[in-house]
Image (cartoon, rainbow, N blue to C red):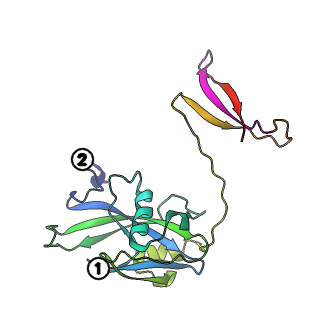
């Protein structure tokens, strides 16, 4: 927890002697996990790396990293129904000093998110400067011991499922998009409208609806 204290960003490379990284645990329908051979370390790891300022979350950074390292697009991935955006594993590993970059020895606390492949295997396009190869390992052969144990105990099967999701959409006038469900068909095409929140006496919320919009 001390890593989260202080003024310096805990995901910054400059944060020493340790900082936070993230990884993508990409699982196919044969319950295999994508691994890459990293040139700098010589280690076989799941795709991952350092978050960048443009990444809004660690999960978004993991998606970006797997895309940069392997060419797998965000549209090729989905969250697992069992975990959604919850990390499957948080582990640490020590990094040796790199005289070529001036980095001293330090530690990575790696936050790992699980994803399923959607559909068939996409063609891998490896980031040649950093990645020397890629391979798929069954759960019992995953390189990280902590991740391996959690995968074997997870029940993850690599098969995407439909899940319910909602989005709350605001505009710059303080209104939000409201979708009216109409099983009986009384509204016809007038199923979406804009609503503005206002306060009733006593502090209870009320909704003031704007003109209805068509689908």
Residue ID at (20%, 59%)? 16
The quarter in which the N terminus is drawn is: bottom left
Residue at the (26%, 72%) spot, across then down: 94
Labelled disc at residue 98: none
Q: Mark 1 points at which residue?
A: 39
In 3D space, how far apart are the residues under numbered discs 2 and 1 (Cα atoms)?
33 Å
- Out of 215 and 170, give the one closest to the viewer: 215
Mark 2 is surrounded, within 10 Å at the Cα level, by few (under 14), some (14 to 19) or many (20 or more) other residues, namely few
The residue positioned farthest toward the front in the image shown:
214
At 43% across and 76% down in the image, what residue appears?
125
Q: Is mark 2 on a helix, strand or loop?
A: loop
Answer with the quarter of the image where residue 159 lies. bottom right
Q: Give the range drawn in magenta.
A: 189-204
Q: Nearer the viewer, residue 136 or 176?
A: 176
Secondary structure of the residue carrying tag 1 is: loop
Mark 2–mark 1 CB contact (< 8 Å): no
Rendered image: mark on residue 6 = 2
Q: Position of residue 144 (x, y in %)?
A: 40, 77
At horizontal 30% and vertical 51% (from top left) the residue drawn is 4
Image quadrant of residue 108? bottom left
Does residue 77 show up?
A: no
């Amino acid at each position: 927890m001390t890593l989260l204290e202080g003024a310096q960003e805990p995901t910054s490379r400059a944060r020493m002697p340790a900082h936070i990284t993230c990884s993508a645990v990409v699982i196919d329908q044969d319950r295999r996990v994508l691994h890459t051979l990293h040139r700098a370390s010589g280690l076989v790891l799941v795709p991952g790396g350092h978050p960048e300022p443009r990444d809004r979350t660690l999960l978004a950074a993991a998606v970006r990293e797997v895309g940069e390292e392997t060419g797998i697009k965000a549209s090729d991935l989905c969250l697992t129904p069992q975990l959604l955006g919850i990390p499957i594993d948080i582990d640490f590993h020590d990094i040796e000093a790199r005289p070529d970059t001036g980095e001293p020895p330090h530690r990575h606390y790696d936050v790992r998110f699980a994803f399923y492949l959607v559909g068939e295997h996409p063609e891998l396009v490896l980031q040649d400067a950093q990645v020397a190869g890629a391979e798929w390992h069954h759960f019992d052969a995953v390189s990280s011991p902590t991740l391996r144990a959690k995968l074997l105990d997870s029940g993850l099967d690599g098969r995407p499922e439909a899940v319910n999701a909602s989005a709350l959409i605001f505009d710059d006038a303080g209104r939000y998009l409201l979708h009216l469900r109409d099983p009986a068909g009384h509204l016809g095409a007038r199923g979406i409208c804009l609503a503005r929140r206002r306060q009733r006496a006593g502090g209870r919320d009320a909704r003031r609806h704007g003109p209805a919009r068509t689908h």
